[in-house]
Structures are given as C-alpha cells and as structure tokens.
Amino acid sequence: MNGVLRSPLDAWAAYKTGAGSAGLSRELLEAYQLNRLRAAIRLAYTASPFYGQLLAGVAETGLDSLTDLQRYPFTTAEDIRRHGPRFLCVSQSDIGHVVTLASSGTTGPAKRLYFTPEDQEATVSFFRSGMVSLTAPRDRVLILLPGGRPGGVGDLLLTALKQSGAEPIPHGAVGDLSAALAVMAREQADSVVGIPAQVLALARWADYSGIKIAVKSVLLSTDHVPRAVIRELKRLWGCEVFEHYGMTEMGLGGGTDCAAHAGYHLHEADFYFEIVDSVSGEPLPAGEKGEVVVTTLTRRGMPLIRYRTGDISRFVPEPCPCGSALKRLAPITRRVGRYVSLGEFGRFTLADLDEAIFAVRRVLDFTAAVDSFANAGELAISVSAAGQPAGDGGRDIYDALESVPAVALARRAGKLKVAVRQEACQGTLAPSTGKRAIVELNNADGN
C-alpha cells in the first residue's frame, strides 16, 4: 500500500454493510448494494406517487444483477422541480429538513429536497468517518461553511466532529478576511474546512498581511476544487489538502479523498453510482468520462432512482495506493452543458479559468462574464487582488489566459475580446454560498 493509510471510509462501509471481521470487499459490497437497490426500488414504487408512475412496468421485473438497473428510467433535476412533493415516501410530518435550491435560469420552479432525521444522520455518519483522514480527537477544526440553519452542511459537520471527539469552531462562510484570520489565530485551529476560492483568498490575505498561519490540514468542499488552489495552500500553509465531493440531492455526502489524494472514495454504502454517456445515457466503462448518475440505497424520505447529477467525471480504474475496496471518482471539472463555446476555436469552462487565473499569486478572487453576438464575443474578467494591482494593465492575467486554448486561439483570430478589470481587495469577500459560475450576457452559447 506504499505506506498510505487505508481510507477510513472502508471501515465505515464495512460496518454499514455488515462485512464485520471479514473486511470490505467488492464482492460483499456489491451483494449488499443489490439487496439495497431492490429494497429502495420497492419502497419508491409502492410509496412514492411519482415513482409509482415512472417505474410502472419495470419495477415488477426485479433486479437479478446490478447491471439490470440500466433498464430503469433516469430521474432528472426537472423532475424534482416539477414534482418534488410527489417523490415523498413518508408523510410531511416525518420530514425533518427541507432544502430549496433556486432554478439556475431566470424563471421556473425551485428544487425542493426533503430529508427525514434518519436521512440526515446517515450524512453525519459519513462526515464523521471521512474527517478521520484529516483530524484526530481533540483537534480544533474551523468550519468556514454556511451553517446558521439546523440541518445545513455546517451544522451537520459540527455534529459529526463533536461525535468524533474533535472540537469544532463554527464560523460560517468567509466575509471579512481579517476577522476570519483573527479567529484562526485566537482559536489555534489545527484544521480548516471551507469553500475552495474563499480558503485561497484567506491564505493569500494572510500572506499579504504578514500573518503566519500554521494548520496541519484543510478540507475543501461545496464547489469545484482547482489544482491551482491546492498547490497554493500547500505552498503558503504547508498543510495537507483534502477534497470532498457531494451535492444537496445526495444529502451532502458523496465522496472524500484519502491520504493518497488520488480521487474521491465514494459513499457506496448509501449510494450506487454509475457513469453514463451524457447524450445517449448508455453506461460507460471505468476510465471513460461521462455524467455521474446516483441511486440512493438507504434514503427513506425522498429516494432518488438513477438521478442524473449533471456532473462530468469518470471512475478511476487503477487500485488506490491506500488499498481501499471503494470505487473512486476523479475530480469534477465541469457540468453537463456548462461551458462557453467559441465555435471553431473550441470551448472553455469555469474550471479552465480557475486553473489559469488562480495560479496568479496576487489574485484573491475573480468573476467572469461572457457576451456573445453575431461575429465576435467578449470575456470580461474582474479580479480582486491583494494590494494595489500592478500597473501593467493586468498583463499577468492576460498571460495566464494564454493557457486556456480556446480563449487564446479566439483572441489571436480577433473573435474574442478580453477585458480585465482589477481592484485592490478591501479585506472583504462578496457573499457566496460556494457555487461559482460564468455569468452569461446576451445568451452566450454553452455555460
């Protein structure tokens, strides 16, 4: 195992699946998943008005193998927006937490997700096990995540850390950089959990302000994690950086990397994952990139059968150096359709801009907007920098964008104008829940 400790999620999954002293294996795990899939589909079909209709004609055929699930129809975000309450398999009085996610468009209903207390306890259990990789009992953990409401991600993580014997320090998402750094220093935090762009801004503001920070580990969550951010946190704080993958539809638990940092070990005791072609819906073999599809195995309140997450990734086919039996997911770099097309010059995503612009060391944060019209387009980048921006008109930002092929090619051909606006950060970040996106003006194609 190359000296890398096995992912703690293996022991957690072994307990959940009843593997016991035999230890977790793919054979035992997949037998457990097949039994859980049968039960989950039976519950959804018999108790949910939505699934009673959707699965009519297929649920009665049963499942003889995991691959038989491919016969079942997909569930989509649009289904949840239009029929949310009809997904429920319990009465409204049995629901302990409801999350409303606004539509990504300008109109249309929001998505509403429903969770029983037992559903949320499964997330706490996953968090508690996953945090073992980066914390030890009595460690002080600063939580830089939204957490004001009971049942939110910050609240569930706080509960999990208390149960594991660590000492959580709830703070909330980063707004005032100096205030957050003061809390880190006063509380002597050993570890930090936060939103990637915000934690990067915090580290660079500390460096700019001459404040020495000593933490042993950082966990980045709630949004895409740029490699540039990981490199910079390691450089500035000398810490180990872990990543978490999850989404509200999954109850916030999805996967966490281990000390090998070679992909997210998946939450396979509570979810069954697939990778499918984002256009045809056909299953793809391990190693091929496609859309992540998830089926809940233990969800009681609002189960999801073959839910299309919109995330693009792949299963990592090689064994993990830690020796885990759990499947691994490669980092998410984009979502289905979430890109900007520059026609013959190719396309780019926010992840491409993240890798380029966050590599510029003075950048604390940035926003991007695209405006397309008949024969050309414009990409506007607004940069928040530590200290006064250099007097070179943002030349380092322009140079960084040369590493994004579609942008570089379109600029040289005169088909894309890039405008960079810089301003010195005044010590505060714009309010954010973590999810960043390229702003579209004039209905640009793609993102």
Image (cartoon, helix red, strand yellow):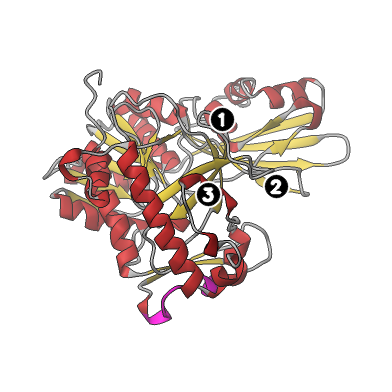
Three-letter code for the amino acid on which mark 2 is drawn: Glu
| Residue 147 picture location, percent across and down | 34, 59
Residue 17 in the image: state x and y as whole percent: 27, 50
Which residue carries the number 1 mark? 288
Label disc, if present, on residue 68 of the rendered structure: 3
Q: CA distance from mark 3 to mark 1?
A: 20 Å
Q: Which residue is mark 2?
A: 440
Location of residue 163 in the rendering, given as x and y in whole percent from the top left corner:
16, 55
Residue at x 42% of width, y 80% of height: 91
Three-letter code for the amino acid on which mark 1 is drawn: Glu
Instruction: Of the two numbered discs 3 and 1 on the same chain, state the one appearing first in sequence.
Output: 3
Instruction: Label 3: state its secondary structure.
Output: helix
For the residues marked 2 and 1, what is the alpha-carbon distance in whole angstroms?
Answer: 30 Å
Question: Is 64 colored magenta in this rendering?
Answer: no
Q: Amino acid at mark 3?
A: Asp
Mark 2 and mark 3: span between their CA atoms? 40 Å
Decide which of 279, 408 is in the foreground and name it.
Answer: 279
Quick check: is 85 in the magenta stretch?
yes
